[in-house]
């Protein structure tokens, strides 16, 4: 039994989007144009579009039209969650590609952020965070050697927070974050496969255990065409 016409039209629109006929953020043709294109009534076309809106592929903007929805990852800045955990919630399989792993003397700034004593060293790890071979985030993180003496290259190819909580046995309480738009340096642009003229999002953060100990300082660079940051503000009663 053949699928209803509106379902077949919805499938054709899906295929057009996947093939790049209509790109993310682009308005689709009007109902009149679509009804002529698919030789169907406007009611049938409206049903097809409704299906795709409900599936999250299209979005209606009142007074403007219907657009191909941008499939950005929505990152809630009030939820402390690792990249690995975030991707798994979206049924995506993340990969961490280590670009640099060193034992270094911290700069004065890093030393101050991690509240280190004179002479303490840190692990510096630069990781490319990928999904389906596409880089989403570049992470540069600093971890005190005294807290994580067994940290290794192979550990950092997995989930950093899993290692800290499950293997080290420390409970993470919270992270303090600042997000700003920046233009990428040449090496960051290369790691994220973006043009140097395209703004990206930089997050500077430090994280603490439940006892108040600062255990990490990180600078993360997010592709602005893949990520959006959201927050919920409540009015005080």
Image (cartoon, rainbow, N blue to C red):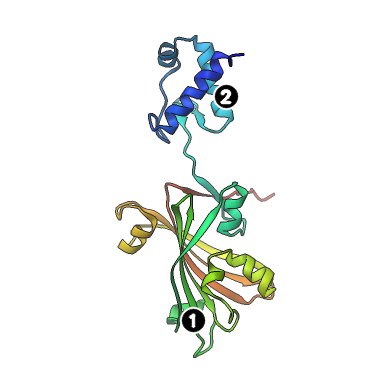
Kind of element beneath mark 2: helix
- Residue at image position (50%, 19%) is 9
Q: Quadrant of the N terminus?
A: top right
Residue 211 lies left or right of residue 77; in this view the side is right
Q: Up-down: is 157 above or below 70? A: below
Residue 206 in sight here: no
Q: Which residue is mark 2?
A: 51
In the displayed structure image, the side of residue 27 where residue 131 appears, left or right: right
Residue 171 x/y as whole percent: 69, 70
Name the quadrant containing residue 2. top right
Q: Position of residue 49 (x, y in %)?
A: 52, 22
Whole-percent x, y for residue 133 in the image: 45, 52
Q: Residues within 10 Å of mark 2 (few under 14, many from 20)?
A: some
The residue at which mark 1 appears reads as: 111
Q: Quadrant of residue 105?
A: bottom left
The disc at residue 183 is none
């Amino acid at each position: 039994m053949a699928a209803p016409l509106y379902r077949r039209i919805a499938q054709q629109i899906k295929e057009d989007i996947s093939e790049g006929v209509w790109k993310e953020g682009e308005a689709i043709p009007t109902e009149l144009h679509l009804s002529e294109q698919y030789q169907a009534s406007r009611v049938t076309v409206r049903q097809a579009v409704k299906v795709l809106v409900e599936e999250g592929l299209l979005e209606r903007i009142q007074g403007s039209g219907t657009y191909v929805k941008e499939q950005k990852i929505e990152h809630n800045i009030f939820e402390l969650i690792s990249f690995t955990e975030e991707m798994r919630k979206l049924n995506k399989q993340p990969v961490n590609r280590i670009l640099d792993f060193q034992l270094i003397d911290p700069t004065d700034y890093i030393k101050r952020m991690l509240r280190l004593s004179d002479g303490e060293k840190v692990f510096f790890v630069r990781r490319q965070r990928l999904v389906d071979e596409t880089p989403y985030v570049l992470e540069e993180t600093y971890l005190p050697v005294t807290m994580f003496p067994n940290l290794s290259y192979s550990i950092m190819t997995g989930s950093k927070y899993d290692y800290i909580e499950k293997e080290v046995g420390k409970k993470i309480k919270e992270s303090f974050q600042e997000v700003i738009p920046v233009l990428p340096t040449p090496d960051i642009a290369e790691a994220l496969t973006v043009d140097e003229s395209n703004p990206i999002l930089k997050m500077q953060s430090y994280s603490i255990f439940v006892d108040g100990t600062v255990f990490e300082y990180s600078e993360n660079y997010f592709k602005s065409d893949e990520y959006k940051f959201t927050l919920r503000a409540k009015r005080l009663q």
